Amino acid sequence: MRNARYALTLTALLAAAGASAQVITPPTGQAPPPATPTPPPPAAPAPAKSAPYGAGMKVNISPDGSKYLRFMTWHQIYARYNENNTGTLRAPNQPKASQVDFGIRRSRLVILAQLNPRFLIYTHLGINNQNSVSGGVAPTADGKKPQFFIHEAVTEYKVNKYLNLGAGLHYFNGISRLTSASTTSILTMDLPLTNFPTIEQTDQFARWLGIYAKGRIGKFDYRVSMNDAFLTNQASTPLSLGTTTSGVSTGTGVANYNPQNTSHVYQGYFSYNFLEPEANLLPYFQGTYLGTKRVLSVGAGFLYNKDAMYSRPTSSVVTLTPAVTADPFGTIATTKHDMKMFGVDAFYDAPLDTASRTALTLYGVYYNFNMGPNYVRFVGPENPGYGTAAARGNAIPQSGTGSAVYLQAGFLLPKNTLGPKARLQPYVAYLHSNYEGLRDASGDVKGVNVYDAGVNVLLDGHNAKVTLNYRARPDFTNVNSVQYRPEVTLQTQIFL
């Protein structure tokens, strides 16, 4: 018992000594020492610099990236001042000489997948040319709710390193490089549209339903295709090819698309690259490489469609009877015309000074179109004019029987011209066409001349750019008095 008391007393003394050692009373009149400062929090990591965009939104399905799913999307938005062609309406019975308008030139989505080195599938969807006047689900009424439709739906098989075979709704066109142009890397703000002579007639927005073969042998690239012609111009009959006076229909001698066309369309484009090769996985030809490649390519292409057009000569005079009006195809003779088109072009794109990163882009093409006698078609991109008049708004003669030459040149200015990030690329373009259906009162063919000048402000290459373009275009409302109208457009493009 006594030993237990000794143990308890010793424990209490040790605890008291330990407690007194924890608290040190400073001498009288002396301040306690300062507390140890708390260490500062670790500094936040510096933001990472943006990496080049590269292949875009790519999801690898296999560790080595050979199997993947890739997404691409882009918008091109317009703000535009346009001096309209003579007689343009902006709304029913509302003439408009000029206006500022806004629109969506293109809004697209591409989904691309490769699950086997030999198989490729891709889908391209989107809308085009929507403004407040047209481009909607009822394009002659307004621009609301534009049709979101399939541009391309393709499956492709790689036979060997020289040959790929594909099928579906595709963009492997003939005629020229620009007929399969990439719309995200255009040098100028837009394409001249003469490069798409059959757009929305026998094709679906420059795409075709059919089969194709493509490949590369050394420096020689090729693409050929066989396609169905879409039925078009279905409201037309032999009576539409004439004028009616006092119950007599007389042929005009002007061709139009044949609504009974059931022939296949054959196309091809062949090019030779003297310098660096270009990518050919997808059909789109680059407009400018911004000095990242050295390319010199020359090419030639064609399109052939039997009986694509039809006409009635002026010697065709038919008295209208119930039998004639009931069956004009069976009672009125017409002449069928094969559509024959070809083009030759050359493309040069190369860096000039590696230190300042300047670059030069040059392109030229010659077209020859045979579309039947006196055929001419008017087209205006994202047309701000109301109604169906051919020459309304900003429309120009876009295609027809005859020839055309298109030239463009661009120069990428030295880096730091506009600061450390943005780059400037001024350009000019010129289109000259001669169509036999555009004749003045003296019978002379009236040439079509379109002038473009502008500048690309490249904020992140083609992935983020702003383009300012000035166009002087001809107003062919009166072929005997062609006036030139100005058009100023600011386009923003984001491509991911």
Image (tube, rainbow, N blue to C red):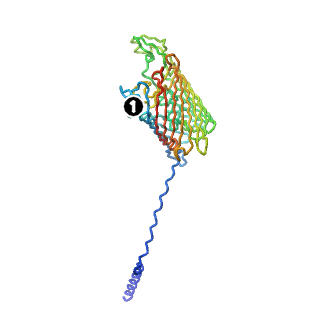
Front residue of this view, candidates 404 and 285: 404
Amino acid type of disc 1?
Val
Instruction: State whether residue 267 appears in this view.
Output: yes
**Tally of marks:** 1
Q: Residues within 10 Å of mark 1 (few under 14, many from 20)?
A: many
Secondary structure of the residue carrying tag 1 is: loop
Q: Is residue 238 above or below residue 464?
A: above
Q: Is residue 247 above or below residue 160?
A: above
The picture places residue 45, in percent across and down from the top left corner, at 49, 57
The picture places residue 26, in percent across and down from the top left corner, at 41, 79
Report which quarter residue 360 is drawn in: top right
Quadrant of image for the N terminus: bottom left
Q: Is residue 260 above or below residue 130?
A: above
Q: Which residue is mark 1?
A: 133
Position of 494 compared to 293: left or right?
A: left
Report which quarter residue 25 is drawn in: bottom left
In the displayed image of the protein, which residue is found farthest to the bottom? 2
Front residue of this view, candidates 152 and 40: 40
